[in-house]
Amino acid sequence: MLRPILAALPLLACLTHLQSAEPLKVLIVDGQNNHKWEITTPVLKHALESSGAFQVSVTTTPPKGAPADAWNAWQPKFAGYAAVVSNYNGEPWPAQVRSDFQSYVHAGGGFVSVHAANNSFPEWKEYNQMIGVGGWGGRNEVSGPWLYVKDGKLFRNTSAGSGGAHGPQHEFVVEIQNAEHPITRGLPARWLHCKDELYSRLRGPAENIEILATAKSDLTAENEPNLMVIQYGKGRVFHTTLGHADYSMLDRGFYETLQRGTEWVATGAVTVTAEIPADFPTAEKTSPVLLEGHPKQVPPVTKPAK
Ligand code: ZN
C-alpha cells in the first residue's frame, strides 16, 4: 500500500512549488489602433499567460470619436497591476487617466509598449519620456534624436528629419546588443523574426534608455532598436517595436522577449520566464507559434527583403 503513495510524492511536491508562485497581474490596454487590435490582443494575452507567470486582464477604451461620457466612464485602475501593456495607438486619454498612468509608472509600476503604442501620444511629454523614442504623429528632430547602433556604439543623430519609417514587411534578423541584461541573457546573439515591419528612424527624448536588440534596416542601413528598456522615475519600461500583426507576434522570439520584458518591468528580475524554449528561433530559421482556434490575419504579398 505504501508504494503508490510514495510514487505520488514527487508530483505533489512539484504541484505545490508551481502553486506557490503567484501569477503577476498584467493589464493590456487596447481599443484604438491603426492596427488590428481586436486580433492581436488575444495573441498578447496568450503570449503572456502561456508562460504561467501572468494573469492578464484587458481594458478597452471607447472607440474613436466617442462622446465625453464614454471617456469619463473609462477609469482603469493601473495601480492594481504589476505591469501595463499598451496595444493602443489613438486619441488622447482623458487628463485624469494620463495623470494616473504617469504617476503609476513614476512610482514604480511596470510598462510595456508594443509596436504602434510608440506612435501614440506625440504631444504627451511624459509618455514620450517613458517610451524613449517613437514614430509618426508629426515626430521630428524637435522630438529628440534618432537612435541607432553602429559597431556596438549608440548613436544619437540630431539632424533634421521626420521620426518613424518602415519598408515592406519581411522576416529579419534580430541582433542582441546587450547580452548581460536579464531580458536578453542567454538568448542566441542573432535570431530570425517572423514577417513584420522593421521600424526605423524612431525619435524621442531617449533619456535613461538602454538598447537591448536591433535589426538592420533596408531603408537606413543602420541597426535600428527593436528591444529597449527605459527608466522612468522608479518605474521600468520595456519597449518592443516588434508586433505589427498577429503573424508577427505568433513568433517564439516575440513570445519569449515579451514574457521576459513584462516580468522584468514588474519585478526587476527575470526568473519565472528565464528558461529558453527549445524551439527558440535561430539565425536561419523562424519559429512560428501555433495558437489553436486563432482566426489568422493573412500577411500581405510583398517583395522579399533585399
Ligand atoms: Zn505596424
Image (cartoon, rainbow, N blue to C red):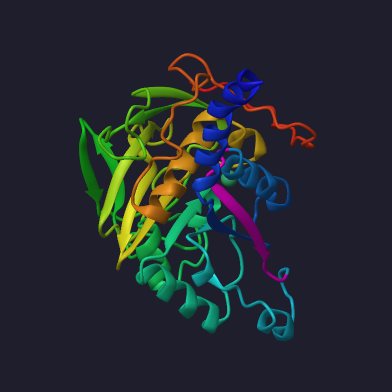
- Please tell me whether residue 57 belongs to the stretch shown in magenta: yes
Tell whether 255 sits left or right of 227: right
**Which quarter of the frame holds ligand 1?**
top right
Q: Is 219 above or below relative to 89?
A: above
x and y percentages locating residue 192 in the rendered image: 47, 23
Quarter location, residue 148: top left
Residue 50 seen in the current view: yes
Image quadrant of residue 74? bottom right
The residue shown at (66%, 38%) is 246
Left or right of 135: which side holds 71? right
Q: Quadrant of the N terminus?
A: top right
The residue under the point 60% across, 52% down is 55
Q: Position of residue 143 (x, y in %)?
A: 35, 64
| Location of residue 84 with respect to 193 vertically, above or below | below
- Residue farthest to the front? 1
Which span is picked out in magenta?
Answer: 51-62
Q: Nearer the viewer, residue 195 or 7?
A: 7
Q: Residue at x 43, y 41 (%)?
A: 260
How many marks do you count on the picture? Answer: 0
* 305 vs 70: above or below: above
> Is residue 180 positioned above or below 3 on the image?
below
Answer left or right for 73 relative to 252: right
Which residue reaches farthest top?
284
